[in-house]
Image (cartoon, rainbow, N blue to C red):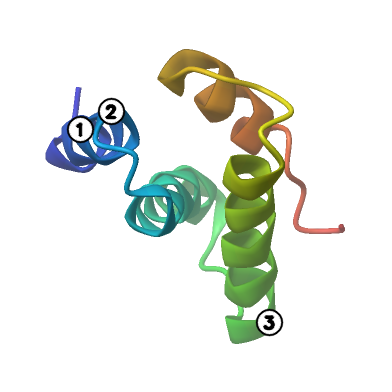
Amino acid sequence: MSDTEVSFRAALHDEQFTTAAVLLAQLMAARHAQHGALSLVQDMRLQRHCLDLLTQRSVSGADALLQAAAKWSVIS
């Protein structure tokens, strides 16, 4: 588990949802970076997607949020 993921889980536990969303976006951007860097627009869309996941609370728990965020596509 990376430092970013540990920080994400801690922020989520402490109900610091904005911070958790930023960290979740960083985790997902790092995964996508394996296939090439995200453009600025893609990065902004990813950050918005992660913020939406946390504010809508359609899923709960760190693992569920990580899975939901991983389904984001650069095509979105």
**Circle 3 sits on which residue?**
41
Q: Residue furthest left?
A: 3
Going by the numbered disc 1, the residue's amino acid type is: Ala
Direction from residue 30 to residue 44 in the image, left or right = right
Q: What element carries label 1?
A: helix
Front in this rendered view, residue 58 or 49? 58
Residue at 28%, 29% in the rendered image: 9
Sequence-first tag of 1 and 3: 1
**Circle 2 sits on which residue?**
13
Q: Where is residue 35 in the image (x, y as percent from the top left)?
A: 56, 50
Q: Which mark is residue 10?
A: 1
Tell me the CA gap for discs 1 and 2: 5 Å
Q: Where is residue 70 in the image (x, y as percent from the top left)?
A: 62, 33
Q: What element carries label 2?
A: helix
Q: Where is residue 66 in the image (x, y as percent from the top left)?
A: 51, 27
Front in this rendered view, residue 51 or 14? 14
Q: Which of marks 2 and 3 is in front?
A: 2
Tell me the CA gap for discs 1 and 3: 28 Å
Going by the numbered disc 2, the residue's amino acid type is: His
Res 6 quadrant in image: top left
Circle 3 packing at 10 Å, graded few (<14), some (14-19), many (20+), is: few
Q: In this view, does 13 lie above or below 46?
A: above
Front in this rendered view, residue 71 or 52? 52
Q: Marks 2 and 1: in contact by CB < 8 Å? A: yes
Res 71 quadrant in image: top right
Q: Marks 3 and 1: in contact by CB < 8 Å? A: no
